[in-house]
Amino acid sequence: MHQRLSYKVASPEAFRAMLNMEEVVHDSGLEESLLELVKSRASQINGCAWCLDMHTKDARAQGETEQRLYLLPVWREAPCYSERERAALAWTEAVTLVATQEVSDAVYADARVHFDEKALVDLTLAIIAINGWNRLNVAFRTHVGDYISPHAVAS
């Protein structure tokens, strides 16, 4: 598989628009640990190796455990996620897969138990953003493996 064009170079304006959306997400007040789980899970669903590499490295650098990252594809069966994280992961899957299944009332109701109106909109924007990044990186076959988390402690 060969890397295609660099979307960052080809359209700096589009890249900046995506970065602006990320800034809104990170300024939303949602926990960074939750955002990394959501971004990792959406990237797994979408088959985006670049984003999965990035977000698992960022999660680890911020203190996430290996076990929770390994169990993310089977989060429903794994006891290590909080109820809030479970609601966010269910919402992530539903929004990510919206083209093939509806976002059910049950998933929405559970999300509303754990997220107020603003937080649910912000969480949805985070999911929209990672789905956008996934599509850019998968479509343009961004080179995988070289990402170094800015949160990593220098050794």
Image: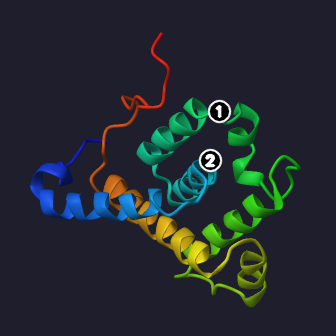
Identified at 12% across, 49% down, the residue is: 9
Asked if the residue at tag 1 contacts the one at tag 2, i.e. Cβ–Cβ closer than 8 Å, the answer is yes
The picture places residue 44, in percent across and down from the top left corner, at: 57, 53
Q: How many marks?
A: 2
Query: Is the residue marked by circle 1 packed among few (<14), some (14-19), or many (20+) residues within 10 Å?
Result: few
Indicate left or right for 130 with 112 as reference: left
User: From the image, which quarter does the N terminus lie in?
Assistant: top left
Task: From the image, tell me which residue sits under label 1.
Answer: 63
Looking at the rendered structure, the kind of residue marked 2 is Ser
Q: Element under label 2?
A: helix
**Relative depth, front residue between 3 and 31:** 31
Identified at 61% across, 53% down, the residue is: 31
> Which mark is drawn over residue 26?
none
Q: Element under label 1?
A: loop
Q: Which residue in the rendered view is the most extreme toward the top?
A: 155
Task: From the image, tell me which residue sits under label 2.
Answer: 33
For marks 2 and 1, give the CA distance: 8 Å
> Residue 137: in sight, yes or no?
yes
